[in-house]
Amino acid sequence: MTVPLNPSNAPGFLIRRLQQASVQIFAEKTREAGLSTVQYGALQVIDANPGIDQVRLSQGIDTDRTTITRVVHRLHQLGLITRRSNPKDRRSNSLRITPRGGAVLEAIADDASASQERLMSPLNAAEQAEFMRMLRKLVFAHSDLGFTGTYAAAPAEADEAPPVAPRRRAAAGGGGGDDT
């Protein structure tokens, strides 16, 4: 006789529930901006890498090409990024953040950080560091399942993920739902 699976003891179930909590907390904290977590991540990567193409962007945030196409389309519709044909490869677009996109990043940066702090708040500082170390180890260990980005290439024992921080702007506002 097999013992039925108890979801509260299943890592996949708990990871999914934590991801749902993370998205909800982010949405509550950043509601006015109207961006999903994936859109916000893409905007950060575009800000940190002016001129990035969609393939590199999809790799940078570990998402598939179909999703990144919708994300880029939405960010462009909102006037947060520009898309220009890459002069070196007409098949790809060069993406840049607009002043409006920079202003949105600036406006929600504190709230986005606060959402992460709230998510991790049940853990003390040592537990947070250990949780992040173990989480990275699991993500990196399963990179063979289709993760394509820079994070998948990091060593399993890495203490920190590669940085993806927006560049500083001289003046506020400057700068070059579902998950899409």
Image: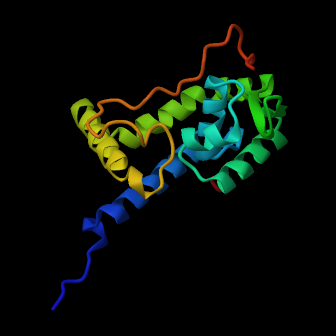
Give the left or right position of residue 149, taking residue 126 as reference: right
Q: Which residue occupies the foreground of this view, 145 or 135?
A: 145
Give how far across and how far down residue 103 sits, in percent: 73, 24
Can residue 170 be seen? yes
Relative vertical location of residue 28 with respect to residue 159 in this rendering, above or below = below
Please, which residue is most extreme toward the left here?
1
Residue 135 falls in image quadrant: top left
Can residue 122 be seen? no
Give the left or right position of residue 58, taking residue 69 as reference: left
Please, which residue is most extreme toward the front here?
88
Q: Which residue occupies the foreground of this view, 29 or 159?
A: 159
Which residue: 36% across, 65% down?
Answer: 13
- The colour mode here is rainbow
Which residue: 44% across, 39% down?
Answer: 151
Which residue: 71% across, 29% down?
Answer: 104
Relative vertical location of residue 137 with respect to residue 8 in this rendering, above or below = above
Q: Which residue occupies the foreground of this view, 136 or 64?
A: 64
Quarter of the rendering occupied by the N terminus: bottom left
Give how far across and how far down residue 177 sits, in percent: 66, 55
Which residue: 26% across, 36% down?
Answer: 157
Give how far across and how far down residue 46 sits, in percent: 66, 30
Give the left or right position of residue 133, taking residue 28 as reference: left
